[in-house]
Image: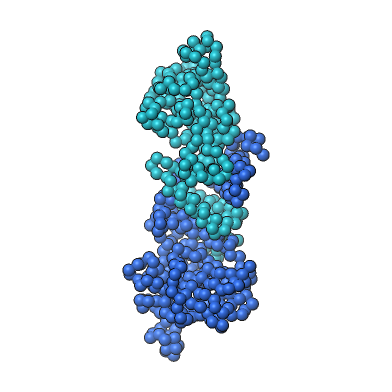
Chain colours: A blue, B cyan
């Protein structure tokens, strides 16, 4: 239908008139995205019926979010995260076959060049916090162990900060490491029991959460990227199920299947066998990778 | 339902889980707005199924829109305008009783302190462009003329620029004036035949329109704010129905009832009576104000 046939904009036909303006030779995916976004945006406005002042407040909020973004801070991603959109996009793009481990968000603290370490290494370079042994196995959905799987792990320290957030205060590459499985698909490494931490909450998204009576904490977790030939790459976390924020992750990253076991070990024989000098946490979690498409 | 009962985030329950996080003692209208926006935003994402890369492109676009905003430029309002949202909010907030004149967007070029002029004055201070006589009557929905109605008018010049966009090039308060009706409710003033002009299209919103194959022009119009005691204030335009962009206003401001008559007058007697020295345009449009609530 041409613009002229569509007629002038009214409250009733608003979305259709806007969408009808897109030219037939516009890039197809952008045209589709615009049509879908306009339809749902207009439906939201019609349901909300904002006053002019309320709409201007929304404009000012988005402007503040934009002004908070710089090379080091991405406030629109935080907004997407805290509205559950990042996790929804993750879910849509990572529908796994039955039995495969689930994904969750990458987060902003991955670095691509962490060192590859011998299996079993301690990634905690400053000996701060409660010691932890992490172990498990990586298999395919057929249950067979995956040889030469690459395990890229990273975590915050016991105060809730990643090394890149505390340059100079933490050793470089603290609490990061890359490991490679052998034929048994097993992995194990040492780290430090992670702690919950807040997402950056000193900007407009933090103020927004506060007005909603929402906190800004993520429950304690370890990040993983698992890669192996002939398998789909898995970006995920494992979580401490006893964390106070496990049911209210500010960015909705928790999935039931990603709860690991965190066992506090006080038995002297096990402490000695693990190579620690006192009680430690033993975390166990297996991963199942989906076959590459 | 508590967060815990609601369970963890999944692709299916995503919006419900996000909305359930809002605290019971959050500000009620913000909580309502957030619930509505989250519901429709998640529905849009589920329909669009963006890839991670596409979602990041959207984040980058919003970031650029934010970075384009400063004290003089409001790119998020432009985005709202070009997606038809500003006109939708205007429509929702200005549902008029049958017979009353319709509203349209205020636009960014109104100035509050334009001079009050004697009825009939010429607001074109630099004599550029084709002369125009504008006239009409202001009545209530009962058909009775409104005495002492305040008419605040402003328009772009014949090159499509407002005085505030061309400081130094146009006289101060060029093509602006405030008039007051007498008992007959009639108004008339002189100006210059307006011309279509582009909204600011050198930023991310302009690039977005270009990718959609949309132009950035607004059809020629005159702006009005009409105020009178015991009546609802009316913010509106009148449009030149012969403008090439009359069916494709970049911001969707045109309504059929706002099309004025633009008559080119060449009759020497009428030219003399109007006080012009050659052919002019005679524009006639009556306004009907709704009673104050």
Above or below — where is A256 with respect to A76?
below
Residue at the left extreme, as displayed: A168
Q: Residue A110: horizontal and vertical position, in percent?
A: 45, 67
Residue B230 x, y percent position in the rendering: 47, 27
Image coordinates for residue A119, horizontal then vertical, percent? 47, 81
Q: Is residue B89 left or right of residue A20?
A: left
- In the displayed structure, A53 sits above or below B279; it is below
**In which quadrant of the rendered view does residue A144 lie?**
bottom right
- B161 up-or-down from A272: above or below: above
The outermost residue toward the top is B269
Seen at 51% across and 54% down, the residue is B57
Q: Residue at x 51, y 40 (%)?
A: B81
Give the left or right position of residue A175, taking residue A20 as reference. Answer: left
> Which residue is located at x 52 percent, y 75 percent?
A150
Please state, as top left, top right, bottom left or bottom right, where the N terminus of chain B lies in the image: bottom right
Q: Is residue A170 visible?
A: yes
């Amino acid at each position: 239908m041409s613009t002229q046939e569509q007629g002038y904009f009214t409250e009733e036909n608003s979305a259709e008139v806007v969408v009808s303006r897109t030219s037939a030779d516009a890039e197809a995916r952008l045209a589709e995205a615009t049509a879908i976004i306009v339809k749902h945006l207009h439906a939201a406005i019609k349901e909300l019926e904002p006053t002019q002042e309320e709409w201007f407040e929304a404009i000012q909020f988005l402007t503040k979010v934009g002004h908070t973004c710089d090379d080091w801070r991405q406030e629109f991603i935080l907004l997407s995260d805290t509205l559950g959109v990042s996790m929804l996009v993750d879910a849509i793009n990572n529908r796994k076959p039955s039995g495969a481990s689930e994904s969750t968000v990458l987060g902003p603290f991955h670095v691509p060049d962490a060192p590859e370490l011998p299996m079993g290494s301690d990634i905690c370079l400053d000996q701060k916090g409660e010691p932890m042994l992490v172990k498990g196995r990586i298999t395919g959905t057929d249950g067979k162990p995956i040889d030469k799987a690459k395990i890229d792990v990273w975590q915050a320290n016991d105060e809730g900060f990643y090394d890149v957030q505390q340059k100079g205060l933490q050793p470089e590459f603290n609490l990061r490491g890359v490991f490679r499985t052998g034929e048994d698909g097993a992995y194990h490494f040492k780290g430090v029991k992670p702690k919950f931490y807040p997402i950056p909450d000193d900007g407009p998204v933090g103020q927004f959460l506060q007005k909603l009576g929402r906190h800004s904490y993520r429950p304690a977790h370890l990040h993983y990227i698992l890669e192996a030939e002939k398998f789909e790459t898995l970006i995920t976390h494992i979580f401490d199920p006893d964390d106070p924020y496990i049911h209210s992750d500010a960015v909705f990253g928790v999935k039931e299947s990603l709860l690991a076991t965190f066992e506090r070990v006080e038995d002297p024989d096990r402490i000695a066998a693990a190579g620690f000098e006192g009680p430690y946490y033993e975390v166990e979690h297996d991963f199942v990778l989906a076959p590459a498409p």
